[in-house]
Amino acid sequence: MTTVAFLGAPSTGKTTVAEALAREFGTVWMPEYGREYWEQHQTDRRLTPDQLVEIAEGHLAKEEKLLPEANGYLFVDTNAITTFMFAHDYHGMALPRLRDLAAQAASRYDLVFLCGDEIPYDDTWDRSGDVHRRVFQKRIAADLAVRRVPYIPLHGSLEERIARVKRVLGRYRKYASIGARWGEI
């Protein structure tokens, strides 16, 4: 089983790519739980720090339930790192439990792709604007660097993004680098 996370600011194509790849590989994908939760619980387009913890925990629980259904790959639309970034964006801080979940997310996924923000912005009522998207995108990339999370940038059209992910998956061998360190491969 290979777990693949797609990160990026709002309107960077995470959902579209994860869903398309799941269809192409005949497997399941984990939609962004935060979007569903936000639609039901937001007040003035904001959530409380405790609600952001609930999102990260709920996303992880749903992801765990999907793992047995996955066929070789589980494609995941965002993770607790993004929720952590929203906590800082909304409140300038994150509760300790959310910090812990974001730290766990840093090593949970086999592959992480950072979806580029060069695609047209989908300006819906629930988003904060293209300028904010670009700032948020830079913050996510910086956070991944601080956490030392290796990621693969995804740019271009949907077709180009899918082709890049497929090329990476075609070359990816889980645990290969670990075994190579000890001369086992």
Image (spheres, rainbow, N blue to C red):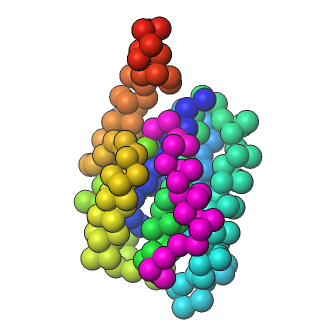
Examine the rendering and report whether any part of residue 76 can be seen. Answer: yes
Residue in front for this viewpoint, 164 or 83: 83
Residue in front for this viewpoint, 115 or 104: 104
Left or right: 34 as drawn, with respect to 175: right
Magenta stretch: dominant secondary structure: helix
Left or right: 30 as drawn, with respect to 150: right
Point out the stretch of residues depicted in magenta: 90-111
Q: Residue at x 28, y 48 (%)?
A: 155
Q: Quadrant of residue 163?
A: top left
How far across and how far down the image is residue 73, in percent? Answer: 57, 34
Q: Is residue 107 magenta?
A: yes
Find the residue positioned furthest to the bottom.
44
How far across and how far down the image is residue 25, in percent? Answer: 54, 32
How far across and how far down the image is residue 58, in percent? Answer: 69, 61
How far across and how far down the image is residue 62, in percent? Answer: 70, 53
Q: Residue at x 67, y 69 (%)?
A: 54
Residue in front for this viewpoint, 79 or 142: 142
> How many numbered markers are drawn?
0
Q: Is residue 147 magenta?
A: no
Left or right: 118 as drawn, with respect to 107: left
Q: Height in image: 166 above or below 9?
A: above
Examine the rendering and report whether any part of residue 121 can be seen. Answer: no
Q: Height in image: 128 above or below 36?
A: below
Q: Height in image: 130 above or below 105?
A: below
- Which image quadrant: the C terminus? top left
Q: Height in image: 22 above or below 42?
A: above
Q: Residue at x 39, y 80 (%)?
A: 128
- Which image quadrant: the N terminus? top right
Residue in front for this viewpoint, 53 or 119: 53
Q: Quadrant of residue 89?
A: bottom left
Left or right: 43 as drawn, with respect to 143: right
